Amino acid sequence: MSTELPPSRKDSEAIQILATEHWSLLATRALTYQESLGRVNMFLAVLSGAVIALALIAQADRFGPTFVSVAVFMLAVVYFVGIATVRRLMMLNVDDYTWVVGMNRLRHTYLELHPELEPSFITGSHDDLVGALKTLGLDSATNSGRGSLSHIFVTLPGMLGVIVSSVAGAIGGLAAVGFGAPVYGILLAGALAFALSLGAILRVNRRSFRGFGPAVEPHFPTPPRPKE
């Protein structure tokens, strides 16, 4: 007596299993976004607290040597928290990309079982970079494969990187004040610290999507476009 299930029942069970995994990935993406926003809120709370504390010290010391010393120390702590936050946001973006790749693989399997449903899908069904960008709503042609420079600044790591680099610029300017630098020296030190910090953050951000493990190696790459 054969115990093999009929093809229709096999397809039904396969779709049920795939749908369960799809919902699991959606929930994981939601948790990823939740942690990202929590990290940003934590950094902004630390930054706000430091600014309020420095305002109180400035009223008492009239921006004297004590204020400069305390400000450099406190802003250094804020800068550390900011760098750690930006780095964690980059890691979470990589995790989110992995979940998108997983959902694209599931969607590809859906279409293998029922190819007639392809016109109903607007997200990607291929697990390479092009397919993942399609699901994320990004155009690979205008984003140079890993995101254009303008797109980086509207992401959480890019936006927060500008704020963190501003803290670095403030530290550089205050350090110059402590060494008795003239006004142009203070401005130059602040601008240099800002530029170095932002440049390093952007470089790490653009390189954070390299070196993926076997889990995100394409199994169903996007077919090449036919030549006109």
Image (cartoon, helix red, strand yellow):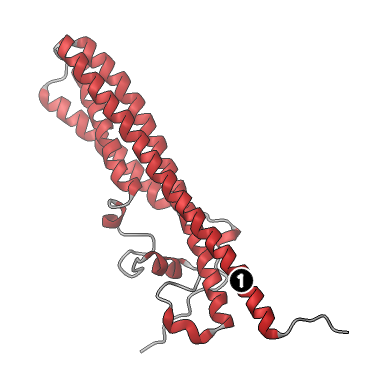
User: Which residue is depicted at the point 47% across and 55% down?
Assistant: 29
The N terminus - image quarter:
bottom right
User: Which residue is depicted at the point 49% across and 74% down?
Assistant: 125
Q: Residue furthest left?
A: 183
Q: Residues within 10 Å of mark 1 (few under 14, many from 20)?
A: few
Q: Residue furthest bottom?
A: 228
Q: Nearer the viewer, residue 191 or 205?
A: 205
- Where's residue 15, x and y in %? 60, 74
From the viewer's perspective, is 29 left or right of 178?
A: right
The C terminus - image quarter:
bottom left
User: Which residue is depicted at the point 58% across and 64% down?
Assistant: 20
Q: Nearer the viewer, residue 106 or 174?
A: 106
User: Which residue is depicted at the point 53% across and 62% down?
Assistant: 23
Examine the rendering and report whether any part of residue 151 can be seen: yes
Could you say which quadrant of the image residue 7 lies in?
bottom right
Determine which residue is flagged by label 1: 16
Examine the rendering and report whether any part of residue 208 can be seen: no
